[in-house]
Image (cartoon, rainbow, N blue to C red):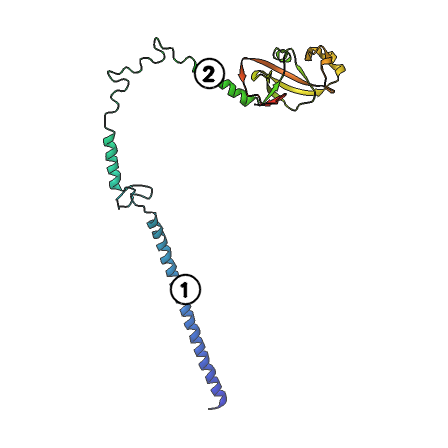
Amino acid sequence: MPAASLRLLLFSLCGDAMGRSASAMKVRGASQTAFQKVRMKIRGAAQPAAKAKAKVKKCSKPRCRNNAASPRAKFCIGCFKDNARCSGARSTGGGNSSAKGVIGNSGNSSAKGLMGNSGNTNSGQKKKFAGKRSALRRSTKMLLVVKNPWLELILAGKKVWEIRGESTKVRGKIALSGGGGLIDGQCHITNSFAIDKGVLGKHVGKHCVKDLGKIAYPRPHAWVLSKARRYKTPFEYSHPRGAIKWVKL
């Protein structure tokens, strides 16, 4: 046989073998893909069943081996019925046989509203004053100490300028006290400004200081006051040691 024809025969045999191996690989790949798909389907179907199985709870009653009636239930059906029977038996005792309205029980014969009983006449007033004190503390955070006779003039509405040695940033409602541990009233601070002693002489009706020589401040300031009011009953407060001007309530 010539060499050329031998080569052609060898090439044809190799090509057939390679084609067969390629087709075999394709068949294997297709079979593996189908197998993986089936395997994934089986796993996907098994997972919900496993989750559902995990949600099942045991009955909460001791020594009961049954499952609960539902995932949210605590007891099985049998134990639930037993508990219902027991609670029903306990609730059928006839109630309170000596309750008000039953023959032989007239209730509290000394209650408020009946003749001879005027009720509690003290605690209500105490609670009322306690409520006023707590309301005052909530609405007023600062207390200004003012000595007499200036405190009395402020509470009477005659003194609307409080002369001090420096300005103040406090505005709004403040409590007033003479420094003896009692809150005597309240007022509002609306403004604060520096003023010369020469100008103070023209506004004696506002600050009520007739003798200007008593004002020893090098640079006086006028605190403008308004809405002064005296309390009918002074409130107690704790005056800290060393507090001369302001006290935080």
Mark 2 crowdedness (10 Å alpha carbons): few <14, some 14-19, many ≥20: few
Tell me: residue 46, above or below residue 135.
below
Q: Give the left or right position of residue 52, taking residue 84 as reference.
A: right
The x and y percentages for residue 152 are: 62, 11
Residue 232 is situated, as x and y percent measured from the top left of the image, at: 54, 12
Within the image, what quadrant is residue 62 found in? top left
**Sequence order check, earlier mark of 1 and 2:** 1
Which dot marks residue 33? Answer: 1
Hey, which quadrant is residue 208 in on the image? top right
Question: Looking at the image, which is closer to me, 8 or 37?
Answer: 37
Q: Is residue 195 left or right of residue 131?
A: right
Three-letter code for the amino acid on which mark 1 is drawn: Thr
Name the residue at the right extreme.
198
Q: Residue at x 68, y 20 (%)?
A: 192
Compared with 139, 214 (above or below) is above
Look at 64% across and 16% down and name the residue there. Answer: 225
In whole angstroms, how far apart are the C-alphas of marks 1 and 2? 88 Å
Q: Quadrant of the C terminus?
A: top right
Residue underneath mark 2? 126
Quarter of the rendering containing residue 202 = top right
| Secondary structure under the numbered disc 2 in the rendered image | helix
Seen as rendered, the residue at the extreme front is 241
Question: Closest to the observer: 88 or 133?
Answer: 133
Residue 53 image label: none
Give the residue type at disc 2. Answer: Lys
Q: Nearer the viewer, mark 1 or mark 2?
A: 2
Residue 237 drawn above or below residue 16: above
Residue at 46 percent across and 80 percent down: it is 14
Q: Nearer the viewer, residue 243 or 184?
A: 243
